[in-house]
């Protein structure tokens, strides 16, 4: 069976070697780069199944690399951020990353994050249902893993698609933060509300006519979120 390919991008050679060695030992083929420009070239050449991407890179930072990849691909991306810098983490998630790990990190933590994003992606790819969920002008095609809003296609990452599907399957029902975090990211993310906040914001940008005044995904203050079955007039 073909091994999954991991693209590792970091300008610190010791970290690059460390991450490559441990991913290789975990069954991945490896591509690597030390600059943002090299990262994009390796992305095109290696067709990775997952990307581990440092934010601080020469030539082009990891945030810009992430944004450019997101224009053409929903490959899982894990950002490596500065220690304890929540702003870096949020910016990475806003750029389209699926997860992040702060420096310094233990190999067990990194591998757990890689396994989590791969599991979410594979769960989406194994979706065999031919059903479509229709909420007003929003259509979620479970079999094709496609979303459209008023007839226009919306490009979602695997995590965003899983979150939208979970909300849509519970239309007009308030879902608590903890339930959504555990269902989409896993039980170890129950307290990581910024993951949910950023992902909801990105979904609104993609499906709402006015993201600042959403019709579909509404906030239930202090509790969670709900998706509404909007009536088309």
Image (cartoon, rainbow, N blue to C red):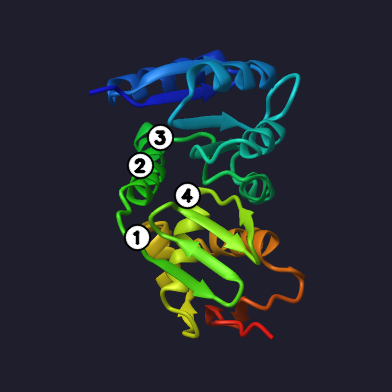
Nearest the camera: 14 or 174?
174
Residue at the extreme left: 1
Q: Is residue 20 above or below residue 130?
A: above
Q: Label 2, on which residue?
A: 112
Specify the label residue 130 is tagged with: 1
Q: Earlier in the sequence, mark 4 or mark 3?
A: 3
Q: Earlier in the sequence, mark 4 or mark 2?
A: 2
Specify the label residue 158 is tagged with: 4
Residues marked 1 and 2 touching at CB (< 8 Å): no
Q: Name the residue at 40% across, 38% down.
A: 114
- Rendered-image quadrant of the N terminus: top left
Is 211 on the left or on the right of 121, as rendered?
right
- In the image, residue 96 lies at what x, y percent? 61, 45
Report the mark closest to the observer, 4 or 2.
4
Q: Residues within 10 Å of mark 4 (few under 14, many from 20)?
A: many
Residue 102 seen from this side: no
Q: Rounded to the nearest whole Å, what is the CA distance between mark 1 and mark 2?
A: 31 Å
- Rendered-image quadrant of the C terminus: bottom right
Q: Earlier in the sequence, mark 3 or mark 2?
A: 3
Report the mark closest to the observer, 1 or 2.
1
Q: Rounded to the nearest whole Å, what is the CA distance between mark 4 and mark 2?
A: 17 Å
Report the mark closest to the observer, 3 or 1.
1
Q: Residues within 10 Å of mark 2 (few under 14, many from 20)?
A: few
Q: Name the residue at 38% across, 32% down.
A: 107
């Amino acid at each position: 069976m073909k091994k999954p390919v991991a693209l590792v991008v970091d300008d610190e050679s010791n970290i690059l070697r460390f991450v490559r060695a441990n991913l290789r030992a975990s069954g991945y083929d490896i591509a690597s780069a030390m600059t943002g420009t090299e990262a994009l070239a390796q992305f095109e050449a290696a067709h990775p199944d997952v990307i581990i991407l440092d934010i601080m890179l020469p030539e082009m930072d990891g945030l810009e690399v992430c944004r450019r990849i997101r224009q053409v691909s929903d490959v899982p991306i894990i950002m490596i951020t500065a220690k304890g810098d929540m702003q870096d983490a949020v910016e990475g998630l806003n750029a389209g990353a699926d997860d992040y790990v702060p420096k310094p990190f233990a190999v067990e933590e990194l591998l757990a994050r890689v396994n989590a994003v791969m599991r979410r992606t594979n769960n989406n790819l194994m979706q065999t249902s031919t059903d479509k969920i229709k909420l007003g002008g929003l259509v979620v095609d479970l079999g094709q893993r496609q979303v459209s809003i008023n007839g226009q296609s919306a490009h979602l990452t695997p995590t965003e698609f899983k979150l939208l599907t979970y909300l849509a399957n519970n239309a007009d029902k308030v879902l608590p933060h903890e339930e959504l975090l555990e269902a989409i990211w896993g039980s170890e993310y129950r307290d990581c509300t910024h993951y949910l906040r950023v992902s909801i914001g990105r979904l609104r940008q993609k499906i709402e006519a006015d993201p600042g005044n959403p019709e579909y995904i509404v906030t239930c203050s202090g509790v969670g979120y709900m998706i509404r079955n909007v009536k088309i007039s």
